[in-house]
Image (cartoon, rainbow, N blue to C red):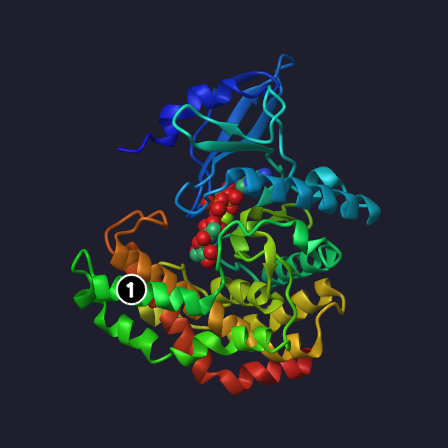
Amino acid sequence: MAVTAEQMLPEVLAAYDLGGQIVGSPRFGKGHINDTFCVYVQTEEGDCLRWILQRMSAAAFHHPDQLMANIVGVTTHLRRAAEAAGRDPARACLRVLPTRAGADYYTDSAAGAWRVYPFVEDTRCLQTAETPELFYASAVAFGQFQHMLRDYPADTLFETIEHFHDTEARLATFEEAAKADTLGRAASAAAEIAFVRARRDDCSVALAALREGRLPLRVTHNDTKLNNVLIDKATGEGICIIDLDTVMPGLAINDFGDSIRFGANHCAEDEQDLSKVNFDLPLFETYTKGFLKGAQGSLTDAELDYLPWGARLMTLECGIRFLTDYLAGDTYFHIQRPGHNLDRARTQFKLVQDMEAQWDAMNEVIRRCR
Ligand code: ADP
Ligand code: GN1
Ligand code: MG
């Protein structure tokens, strides 16, 4: 049995100087991948400090040293860009707190890899787009993130998860899991399996454009969910992009698309009542405007043309990944109930269907906004 993150906390906390006495360290947030804790500290002066402590997922990330080297490099670059733009770097980007020994992360006695960031206070982390204004704010922030990294040396970045948005590879892995059906779950997902197989060719659309040189490889975030941007409580602006584990060379349309997948609707990613799961075209337009504003003209014409495909493909791919994890025994995404990953796959496929039905309108939105 794997060691739980909670069991390791005392050892890990002792490896850091967090500026006072630790008074609590509950689990925190709604991420599906890492084990995240919020550490509350009382300083000698009696003030309260908070830190984010994370055990990086060993299932997702096989080389924490490379992952952390990427994050240190990218956050250093973002800090300089924030300073140059006159923004407060302590709120505009994550900062890696070194261990007492001066390392960027701590490896515990059970080989788990941990890191600490200052908690960015007075912010909100949204699970759904509560208002179009907040969704717009997240879009500007992700567009700006893209823009700020346009001159980052891509060849210095490690690929933290190989073939991460390689939709063809995701399809192949899905087929293996469906054929192997080691847990006998395929029968309960027959309709979803057929849904994916009917869209086999779609999985190649963006990759073909990349191979043929129509879409450029850039430094991208690759996990642009609404809950990976912190919104300033006072101003409603998206101020800090978090969850930098997957920053690596990728496609800008995927960063755009993953945000649409998660935010251009009014349902939870794991909603069980599919009648509540609807793609929202006005929110798609809202996000497009914000993303293009933030990106400040850094996207090419071809990238603009392919934005609707980014949305459709990230949604399809994410559904394929949830379905694969369901078939393979829920080893990658954290689940809170049996069938959770199948429920998640179903919402994604419903959204794909909606996007297919509104395809012309989506393309028209891009024509209007570009
Ligand atoms: P995961 O990869 O599991 O999604 P994240 O890095 O996104 O992990 O962190 C999980 C959650 O923790 C975020 O959605 C957010 O709520 C919170 N969080 C992470 N880093 C910070 C931070 N520096 N300040 C405030 N909240 C944070
Ligand atoms: C994971 O880490 P988190 O919860 O922000 C996943 C994304 C998926 C997303 C689906 C490293 O994101 O790729 O789109 O779940 N991150 C990783 O909600 O696999
Ligand atoms: Mg996250």
x then y, percent, for residue 140: 67, 60
Q: Residue at x 65, y 14 (%)?
A: 45
- Of residues 155 and 195, the one drawn nearer to the viewer in this rendering: 155
Relative to 359, residue 37 above or below: above
Q: Residue at x 71, y 64 (%)?
A: 295
Q: Is residue 287 left or right of residue 112?
A: right
Q: Which residue is mark 1?
A: 176
Q: Is mark 1 within 8 Å of ligand 2?
A: no
Relative to 164, residue 350 above or below: below
- Furthest-top residue in view? 44
In the rendered image, the quadrant that contains the N terminus is top left
In the rendered image, the quadrant that contains the C terminus is bottom right
- Of residues 167 and 287, the one drawn nearer to the viewer in this rendering: 167
x then y, percent, for residue 28: 46, 37
Q: Is residue 130 left or right of residue 294?
A: left
- Furthest-bottom residue in view? 360
Relative to 66, residue 6 above or below: above
Neighbour tally class for label 1: few under 14, some 14-19, many 20 plus, Cα within 10 Å: some
x then y, percent, for residue 81: 78, 48
Q: Residue at x 71, y 62 (%)?
A: 294
- Which secondary structure, mark 1? helix
Q: Which quadrant of the figure has residue 210?
A: bottom right
Relative to 158, residue 122 above or below: above
Residue 176 seen in this snapshot: yes
Q: How many marks?
A: 1
x then y, percent, for residue 181: 20, 61
What is the three-letter code of the residue carrying label 1?
A: Glu
